[in-house]
Image (cartoon, rainbow, N blue to C red):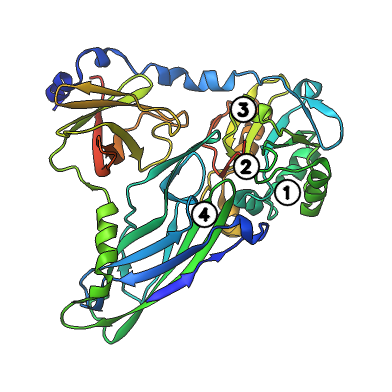
Amino acid sequence: MGVLEAAILATVLSASQAPKVSVSLTPEARSVVPGQPFTVAIRIDLERPWHVYWRNPGDSGVPTIVEWRLPKGWKAGPLQFPVPKRFGSEGGTAYGHDGEIVLLAQITPDAKATGTAKVGANVLFLACLEACVPGEAPLEASVRLGPSPLVDQTAKPLFDRARKALPSTARGLSTAALAESDAYAMRVGGLSDMKEAYFYSDEPNVISNAASQPLEAIDGGFTLRLARSEYAKKPAARLTGVLAVTDAAGKTRGYQLDLAIARRP
Amino acid sequence: MKKTLLSMLGLATLGIALSAWATQDDTATSKMAPEFSVASSSGKDISLGQFKGKYVVLEWWNHQCPFVVRHYGGNMQALQKQMKDDGVVWLTVCSSAPGKQGHVSVEQANEIMKENGGSPAFILLDADGKVGKLFGAKTTPQMVLISPKGEVLYNGGIDNAPNARTKEDMAQAENFVLKAYKQAKAGQPITNPAERPYGCGVKY
């Protein structure tokens, strides 16, 4: 299991201006099966109240990325991010994460892999508070290849927490999106006990990050108005991203949405 | 599907056409730059109006921002020199508030720029963020190009490579300021008058 104090590349900053951060790589299984995907967790433990960035960083920052270093024939799936939060300043609104951040990814071993294999992940992130500091953590973990998977029970709490923080599918929700002159109207039905909602677009240049997203209650749900990005080249064809919904108790849940945008015929 | 949406969202929202798109470029390119007067590291106050008749570049600067550090690996200095040699007035703007990352005194501004080998005409010390907010500067390094008539020709990110990490990545990037400048000089329409700024948030 690779655990490392991340190298903070603070060439121009004193240590007091850099956050404490540790990054680790944990496979869910000790023993994995050739050709069959398994999940790994990348945990960033970041001193509060610093933040790192989501896949769409918003008005500033840079996405947290992982460069995989895998044996030949192995493949890594997309990074799965927790439901993001907003970090606002006069410079705009950024999308990111703070505290314990666990990213998941599926790794598929080569179908002919044998013995023991090393999974490498170089984690690159930018941590910001008032200042911004880049960090890099080259991590490595070993897995054994075997006829059946053997889950690492000690890692279960970590993976449970990580999966709870991921957006869930939009199953059970009725959703639709419509283009307006300078905005998109997102209609969501099927949610009870909803106090606040915010849509995070996966892609930059689709909606304005800093604009408020006015919420209008309608029968059986709500409409969220998303101002289009001033940097959009053309009207978007789809709204893809995470709808974060906060209930009256202040608990936030995320739903991964991918909606075709209807236009005026 | 269409029917469902009609009933869901109501007819009113459908009445609005997408006409705003057609005029977007026109409005973005015909915007006059706001006038300002601000302290500079030369000791003199600098106003935009004094450069009328010349192209002016504004570069938002925070020397401790990792994105700025990356561009000052050689890229920014080369662009400054190229523009300067062509008669363009390059104004580096520091909008970091006192006590925040990138804030510099007159002496620090001159010293750091000299160490970096940069060659702006002036470094504007916009500690109260007035100039930054006038131009809607969100990030460092955000860039603005102003025409000899005082129109904003470009306002946005320096190039199309926000996630570049290596010199090779950066060499492949398309620089939007240079592109807009070349198009303006050639009397061509500016194809990219506004692109998403990227970098560190300006530390107002």
Which amino acid type is marked by label 1? Ala
Q: Which residue is mark 3?
A: B133
Q: Secondary structure at mark 1?
A: helix
Query: Do the residues under discs 2 and 1 have CB atoms within 8 angstroms?
Result: no
How far is mark 2 from mark 1, CA to CA?
15 Å
Q: Which residue is mark 4?
A: A126
Which amino acid type is marked by label 4? Leu
Which amino acid type is marked by label 3? Lys
Q: Which residue is mark 2?
A: B141
Question: Please, which chain is the residue tagged with disc 4 on?
Answer: A
* Residue under the image location 23 percent in, 33 percent down: A194
* Label 3 or label 2, whichever comes before in sequence order: 3
Question: Please, which chain is the residue tagged with disc 1 on?
Answer: B
Which one is closest to the eye, mark 4 or mark 1? Answer: 4
Quick check: B45 left or right of A126?
right
Is the residue A260 above or below the residue B29 in the image?
below
* Label 2 or label 1, whichever comes before in sequence order: 1
Which amino acid type is marked by label 2? Pro
How far is mark 3 from mark 2, CA to CA?
15 Å
Decide which of A165, B181 is in the foreground and name it: A165
Q: Secondary structure at mark 4?
A: strand
